[in-house]
Image (cartoon, helix red, strand yellow):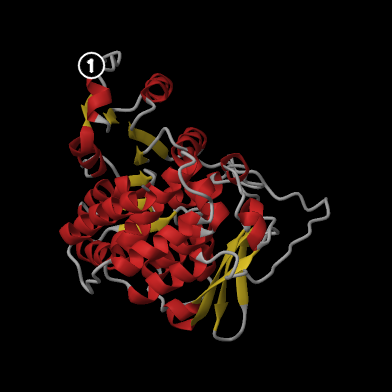
């Protein structure tokens, strides 16, 4: 029996994770955390009865009247997240907090030597070199939850790391893959939030539309799999059935296929190395299936080139790109900037920053704050 803690249980990944734990044998929920959706967190407590609950927004939590229980430990704030992530009774941490906010708690889980089912790609975007070094020192295991990185990880089981020629990350292309540059200028928030294949939170859905999500995944893959940036490619695959591929030195390409549903990569990370019957849907091969693959248009989606640049440079660039993007996406959702402004703003802030090759965690947090202030000025 594995004790699981879910950091970010009220988000899309967290909710899917709860469903997996409920339906897969050998998994037991130990603790959950939520940020602002405390009513949903309360309903999850009532339904799943975890031993520990964290409300990470301390100000909201202090005024929210959780029904108290002698068998459930309630705690608040960042310290509560770190306590849950490193709790001695927890075997696996599903790190599902979106964005920069998930860095410290994920770091705590890795520092404590936990198995981390990583859905928070920003941890590796911000601090990939530092996180992987920490994992090596603490004997922590990092298992990817992003569908693309899970697919690569699964495909890698058929060969050896030294035999990898390249990995190919697939991208749906989002809702705008067929729009030209002129049409992209007038994209609305409502249009950008209408993803054709996936049901995700607002921030990730906008990232998919700009293809910044794929840019961040390029950076994540570089650190997670210890690859050189030129060993990573991206291909557009509108059906989101081929989740990614690995090409080995002998020219063999191994792919992982499944319906676009996050329960499968979540379950694989939580039950690895075992494959167990679970709630994920199956492909229906009694029906005709068409699978398209096409190269991405870097002119229409310049976020991809940013991803490759940051993967090549490393250092502080990941922290700057991630912070700038989070702020720009928020501004777009508030209709303060246009869709095309998101990547433009990220490029400008990235070009302005003072590059540091080997930053400490404290320096990365500092440069994150700097980038947020600078892009606030840019937006204003």
Can you see residue 157?
no
Residue 147 relative to residue 129: left or right: right
User: Relative to the observer, which residue lies in front, 120 or 323?
Assistant: 323
Above or below: residue 44 compared with residue 327: above
Q: Residue furthest front?
A: 380
> How would you rate the neighbour count of disc 1 (Cα within 10 Å): few for under 14, some for 14-19, many for 20 or more?
few
Question: What residue do we see at 43% from left, 77% from top?
Answer: 229
Rendering coords of residue 176 (x, y %): 65, 54
User: Relative to the observer, which residue lies in front, 141 or 101?
Assistant: 101
Give the quadrant of residue 238: bottom right
> What kind of element bears circle 1?
loop
Quarter placement of the N terminus: top left
Residue 288 relative to residue 16: left or right: right
User: Relative to the observer, which residue lies in front, 293 or 249?
Assistant: 293
Residue 152 relative to residue 260: left or right: left
Above or below: residue 283 compared with residue 212: above
How many marks are shown on the rendered structure?
A: 1
Rendering coords of residue 120 (x, y %): 38, 51
User: Relative to the observer, which residue lies in front, 349 or 215?
Assistant: 349
Question: What residue do we see at 42% from left, 50% from top?
Answer: 328
Can you see residue 211?
yes
Disc 1 target residue: 70
Rendering coords of residue 346 (x, y %): 40, 60
Q: Residue furthest bottom?
A: 250
Rendering coords of residue 70 (x, y %): 23, 16
Give the quadrant of residue 65: top left
Question: What residue do we see at 60% from left, 65% from top?
Answer: 300
């Amino acid at each position: 029996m594995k004790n699981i803690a879910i950091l970010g249980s009220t988000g899309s990944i967290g909710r899917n994770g709860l469903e997996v734990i409920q339906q897969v044998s050998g998994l037991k929920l130990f603790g959950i955390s939520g940020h602002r959706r405390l009513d949903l967190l309360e309903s999850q407590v009532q339904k799943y009865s975890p031993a520990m609950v964290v409300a990470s927004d301390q100000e909201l939590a202090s005024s929210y009247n959780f029904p108290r229980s002698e068998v459930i430990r309630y705690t608040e704030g960042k310290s509560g997240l770190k306590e849950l992530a490193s709790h001695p009774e927890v075997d696996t941490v599903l790190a599902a907090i979106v964005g920069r906010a998930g860095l410290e708690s994920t770091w705590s889980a890795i520092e404590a030597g936990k198995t981390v089912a990583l859905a928070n790609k920003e941890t590796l975007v911000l601090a990939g070199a530092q996180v992987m070094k920490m994992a090596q020192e603490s004997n922590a295991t990092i298992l990817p939850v992003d569908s693309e990185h899970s697919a690569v990880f699964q495909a890698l089981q058929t060969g050896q790391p030294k035999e990898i020629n390249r990995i190919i990350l697939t991208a749906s292309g989002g809702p705008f893959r067929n729009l030209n540059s002129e049409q992209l200028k007038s994209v609305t928030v409502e249009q950008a939030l209408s993803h054709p294949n996936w049901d995700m939170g607002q921030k990730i859905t906008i990232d998919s539309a700009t293809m910044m999500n794929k840019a961040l995944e390029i950076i994540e893959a570089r650190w997670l799999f210890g690859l050189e940036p030129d060993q990573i490619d991206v291909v557009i695959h509108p059906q989101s059935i081929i989740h990614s591929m690995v090409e080995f030195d002998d020219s063999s390409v191994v792919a992982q296929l499944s319906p676009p549903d996050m329960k499968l990569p979540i379950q694989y990370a939580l039950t690895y190395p075992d494959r167990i019957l679970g709630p994920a849907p199956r492909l229906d091969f009694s029906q005709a299936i068409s699978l398209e693959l096409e190269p991405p248009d870097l002119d229409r989606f310049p976020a991809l080139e940013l991803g490759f640049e940051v993967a090549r440079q490393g250092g502080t660039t990941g922290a700057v790109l991630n912070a700038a993007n989070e702020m720009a996406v928020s501004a777009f959702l508030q209709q303060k900037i246009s869709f095309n402004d998101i990547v433009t703003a990220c490029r400008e802030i990235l070009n302005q920053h003072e590059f540091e090759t080997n930053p400490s965690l404290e320096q990365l947090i500092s440069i994150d704050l700097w980038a947020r202030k600078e892009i606030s000025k840019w937006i204003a």
